Amino acid sequence: MRGLTIVADYFVICTASSSTNARAIADEVSEQLRHRAGRKPMGIEGREEGWWVLVDFGDILVHVFQSEAREYYGIDQTWADAHIVKQSEAA
């Protein structure tokens, strides 16, 4: 995202199958970054609803969308000019 926005250097965008799944993904990302990199989120938004959970690590923003929310907000199209560092799909 560097050069496209001053908000963060990286966006991590993923899709969850339900609100429970979105909360679990956001919680696990937070736990893994704390455990592996000593980083704690500066804030978490939308966790209760689980429609779109945003985990803010300052230079990294983690977006966990339910598929309908990801389509509705069009984040992929909005940031289509961003360089994709690595894209993977969970099995």
Image (cartoon, rainbow, N blue to C red):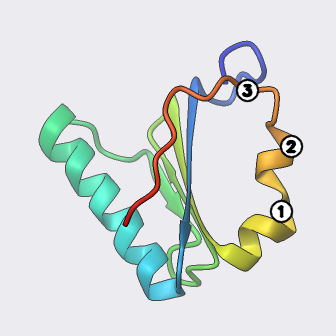
| Callout 3 secondary element | loop
Q: Earlier in the sequence, mark 3 or mark 1?
A: 1
The residue under the point 42% across, 76% down is 23
Question: What residue is shown with label 3?
Answer: 82
The residue under the point 73% across, 65% down is 70
User: Pointer 2: residues within 10 angstroms few (<14), some, or many (20+)?
Assistant: few
Question: Does the CB distance between marks 2 and 3 fall below 8 Å?
Answer: no
Question: Does the CB distance between marks 2 and 1 fall below 8 Å?
Answer: yes
Give the amino acid at mark 3. Ala
In the current view of this chain or complex, which residue is farthest to the top?
A: 3
Instruction: Name above or below for residue 40 compared with residue 24.
Output: above
Where does residue 29 sit, x and y in percent of width and height? 33, 55
| Callout 2 secondary element | helix
Give the amino acid at mark 2. Thr
Where does residue 15 sit, x and y in percent of width and height? 57, 66
Quote the CA–CA distance across marks 2 and 3: 9 Å
Question: In which image quadrant can residue 68 be found?
Answer: bottom right
Question: What residue is shown with label 2?
Answer: 78
Where does residue 50 sit, x and y in percent of width and height? 56, 80
The residue under the point 15% across, 38% down is 36
In the current view of this chain or complex, which residue is farthest to the front?
A: 91
Q: Is residue 61 left or right of residue 25?
A: right
Where does residue 12 sit, x and y in percent of width and height? 53, 44
Quote the CA–CA distance across marks 3 and 1: 16 Å
The quadrant in which the C terminus is found is bottom left
Question: In which image quadrant can residue 21 be found?
Answer: bottom left
Q: Is residue 45 left or right of residue 90?
A: right
Question: What residue is shown with label 1?
Answer: 73
Q: Earlier in the sequence, mark 2 or mark 1?
A: 1
Q: Is residue 34 left or right of residue 83?
A: left
The residue under the point 81% across, 35% down is 80
Q: Is residue 3 left or right of residue 49?
A: right
